[in-house]
Amino acid sequence: MTKALSLLISATTILLAGCEPGTEEVTPLSEGIIYCSEGNPDTFNPQLITSGTTVDATAAQLYDRLIDYDAEKQTFVPALAKRWEPLDNGTRYRFYLREDVKFHSTDYFSPTRDFNAEDVRFSFNRWLDETSLYHNVGGGSYPFFSATGLDKLIQKVIKVDEMTVDIVLNNADSSFLANLATDFAIILSAEYAQQLSVKDVPYLIDLKPIGTGPYRFESFRKDVLIRYTKHPEYWREGPGIEQLVYSITPNANKRMLKLVTGECDVIPYPLISELQALNRDDIVVTNEVSPNVSFWAFNTKKPPFDDPLVRQALSHAINRQAIIDTIYYGNAELARSILPPTSWAYDNQGIQYGYDPEKARKLLEEAGYEQLTINIWAMPVQRVYNPNARRMAELMQSDLAQVGVNARIVSYEWNTFRRRLSRGEHDTVLIGWYADNADPDNFFRPLLSCAAVATGGNRANWCHPGFDELLYEAISTTDAAERKALYQSAQHILNQQLPLLPIAHSRRYQAQKKTVRGVQLPPYGGINFRLATKVTPAEENAQ
């Protein structure tokens, strides 16, 4: 722990001891949990965005999906669909829906019926059907579904009866169920949507959300808090707390201080360099292997990044092991592919661009660039895959200077950063990906397919027809050996073309009070408070 942080924690603890209760924006909850999140959600509908901050705030708390994925058993399990079956050689799936599932009842909506097939049709058609009244509400962009090709794969959604739905595909696809089990494939209320349409305020569907999840929306104050309360009619085992508050705290040091002083019960992304500050009897720090990758993407639509030689040269200039040691404090693995080593399709012969400044200079000279000026966009937020993009950019800036490249670091407020990045204003960007499911397709198509260029998910703006063909061949077969061979061929193309440089696969850290129980960190991202409970300090000490 740095001396500055140690002194700050001590001073803050003493100061707070003399404060009157209730003077803070968010005060400790006796019957609830305060989660100090790192930013504001972009929306309260994860269909519209792939931002981890938005997913953390919405997906598992407000909504359910047709099916879930049990990572421990490595299988799909029922959720709003109690069972399902493939028909017509895998080009049609029939889902039998769960009865007696209640939507949220709030001061702005009172449902008159339970969940049924109409809600499934509406939820899917919102992003599938461009003629749907709600398709363009919220901007009309559905990046996850476009990047994975799910919007082109699904031909139509048919209501068989009130509690049965058929999803018809244009072709069999081995990634279909995996994509349905992600945080983005949520179910909305068709009845609520209809009421908003009648009132001519359809946009409220994403701002004042209604779902079937374990919590219901109460209020949101930008840069301050989100308040949820327990859904009293939740269809399965729910939380043991009455309310869940997201206290929006962008600064990582401040999040750690608030945990120590009791203003937070749970915090994400504690600074790895400062974990010693959390070595206390009342705090638990957990870390888990997670399927993620940080990378440096080159905007291949801009010269000189359209030249593979330049991309290779810049990659050889970067000391990635120094980044692992300095940014991750050794708690990450050097990436040789965008796939993590735990993936069954991983190729350890993938990216072969070690630190070699002399080779970097020669390749730049060969490409006609002895002197070069570029910018590196660095995320202003922490992520599991990149705990400090700004500091990482500074290390890279120093490395690049050694080979005659002048790098300028660029950053903006997070929503502005994402918006300008999607418009392709960057030269290069430090960003990453956290998998939504176990299928390797979830890394390749959202990040590097031609379709993902249009949605903004392909930060390299790289479209390679041969690479794309391999990806679509891989999802068209269920033969595991054949799929692995296709994905390894795809990784070989990445090694040659290098639209992005994989940097690290990191571990995921979280810290919480020992009085908090049941908070789940799904291996494929997000956070789940469905089973969250909180015991008193006396109950904790008695155990």
Image (cartoon, rainbow, N blue to C red):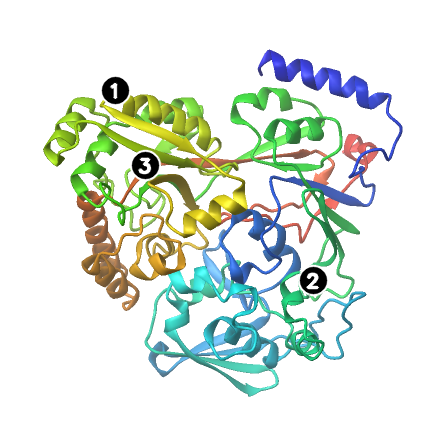
As helix, strand or loop, the secondary structure at mark 3 comes to loop
Q: Quadrant of the C terminus?
A: top right
Say above or below: 37 vs 301.
above
Please say if the residues under marks 1 and 3 sit with CB atoms less than 8 Å apart.
no
Which quarter of the rendering shows the N terminus? top right
| Mark closer to the observer (1, 2) | 1
- The structure residue drawn at horizontal position 48% and vertical position 65%, both measured from the top left corner, is 180
Q: Amino acid at mark 1?
A: Gln
Q: How many marks?
A: 3
Nearer the observer: mark 1 or 3; the answer is 1
* Label 2 environment density (alpha carbons within 10 Å; few <14, some 14–19, many ≥20): some
Q: Which of the labelled discs sits on residue 453, or is there none?
A: none
Q: How far apart are the alpha carbons under marks 3 and 2? A: 40 Å
Q: Are marks 3 and 2 in contact (CB under 8 Å)?
A: no
> Which comes before the other along the chain, label 3 or label 2?
2
Task: Depth check: give the residue in front, 98 or 157.
Answer: 157
Q: Quadrant of residue 535?
A: top right
Name the amino acid, label 3: Ala
Residue identified by numbered label 2: 208
Please name the residue that numbered disc 3 is placed on. Answer: 335
Amino acid carrying label 2: it is: Lys
Q: Residues within 10 Å of mark 1 (few under 14, many from 20)?
A: some
- Residue located beneath label 1 in the image: 402
Q: Of helix, strand and loop, which one carries label 2? A: loop
Q: Position of residue 464 (x, y in %)?
A: 22, 56
| 1 or 3: tag closer to the N-terminus | 3
Chain-order first, disc 1 or disc 2: 2
